[in-house]
Image: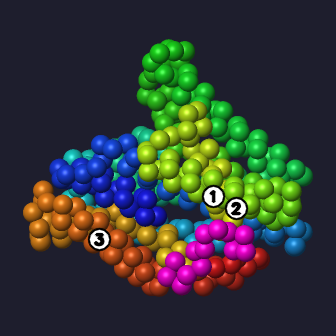
Amino acid sequence: MLLVIVDHVEGFRFDFGLSSFWGNPAVPMLGQLGVTLFFVLSGFLITYLLLEEKEKLGEIKFGAFYLRRVLRIWPLYYVVVILGLFVFPHLDFFFFPHQTPLVSQSLGMKTALYAFILPNVAKELYPAVPYLSQAWSIGVEEQFYIIWPVLVHFSRSYLRNFVLLAGGVFVVAQLSWALTTPQRHILPINEVTDFIKNFLFFFRIQCMAIGGIFALVLLRNWTGILSVLTSRLVQAAAWTLTLALIVRGQTIPYATHEMYSVLFGVLVLNLAQTDTSVVSLRHKWLDYLGRISYGLYMLHGIAVVVGIRVASLLVADASPAHHLLTFLVAVVVSILLAALSYHYLETPFLTIKKRFARIQSGS
């Protein structure tokens, strides 16, 4: 989550005409990798619970699964959508340079796309809506949730289907890029092909499928593979390579997010097995941040703008203190907003959600 906040602090500062590190290629990549990690973790958790439900109870109740996802995702999602489309555009404090005036254009179609949980489609068809730019990943998540339980329930070979889905989406995404590059001219470059190319680039359900493969390895206790993945050497290599690539702003040729997903999968697998992990995240405050992480993700854009406004009132715009204060206020306000959302908006729905839980998840 912190990676995404850093990315958006720098991006928002650039949009507001303030000094930023947005020109450094490592910064925009931080946000993208933060979302990829989120996808891998989501695929890992959801797959583990679905597999356990099928193996322990003999079947997956689709209605209960979808209802749990609705109760977890929709309440805060729709609050943020309403704020972004209908409230913030009319408040001077939240005015976003160059973007707020565009919100009213095609408002009806935007409203319909966001209402039907298609923010990733809206992202490709229309200019970004301030405070909703992060919602595209929620659309990808929800579309993954439609497909995944069916595959898990009816599949006889989980691994084969995981690989087929992950590999299929990756191949289609790479083909779309290859066939629309100006150097090849194999397909015409127009609005349709450009939409397909960009939509598939962000439609990273293969990253969630990769997370699911690691969940399968853990649940089935494939000791041969686990002994390798949980070894200190492999963990140290995964942590070192991941951190080095992030810091240097480098990408892995030809399979960037898929390769990062594998690295993230190794880390998530070991963090889930506390007795093998070389890094421990078992702390009360980290556990709490994990519980409010959805609110942190959905509401941090509001906090970043609050940080910019507060910093501009207290220090000179061009000073390093302005930059630092923006970030600190953004982090603190993000946590406050997420905590308020969790306790007063999300918790009542989460309480209902527990009634439909067939397999209890861990903390």
Q: Which mark is residue 197?
A: none
Q: Residue at x 28, y 49 (%)?
A: 21
Q: Nearer the viewer, mark 3 or mark 2?
A: 2
What's the distance in space between the residues labelled 1 and 3, CA to CA? 31 Å
Provide the secondary structure element on which disc 2 rests. helix
Give x and y (percent) for residue 117.
Answer: 52, 56
Q: Which mark is residue 232?
A: 2
Contact (Cβ within 8 Å) of mark 1 with mark 2: yes
Q: According to the image, label 3 marks what residue?
A: 328
Whether residue 66 is visible here, answered yes or no, is: no
Query: Which residues lie in the magenta part?
Result: 272-286
**Left or right of 94, for residue 248:** right
Using the rendered view, name the quadrant where residue 361 is placed.
bottom right
Quadrant of the drawing holding the C terminus: bottom right
Provide the secondary structure element on which disc 3 rests. helix
Provide the secondary structure element on which disc 1 rests. helix
Contact (Cβ within 8 Å) of mark 3 with mark 2: no
Quick one: label 1, few (<14), some, or many (20+) residues within 10 Å?
Answer: some
Q: Residue at x 67, y 69 (%)?
A: 277
Q: Residue at x 87, y 73 (%)?
A: 57
Q: In front: 104, or 314?
A: 314
Give x and y (percent) for residue 129.
Answer: 34, 52
Whether residue 228 is visible here, answered yes or no, is: yes
* Amino acid found under the numbered disc labelled 1: Ala
Q: Which mark is residue 236?
A: 1
13 shown above or below 358: above
| Magenta-drawn stretch, dominant element (helix, strand or loop) | loop
What's the distance in space between the residues labelled 3 and 2, CA to CA? 35 Å
Mark nearer the N terminus (1 vs 3): 1
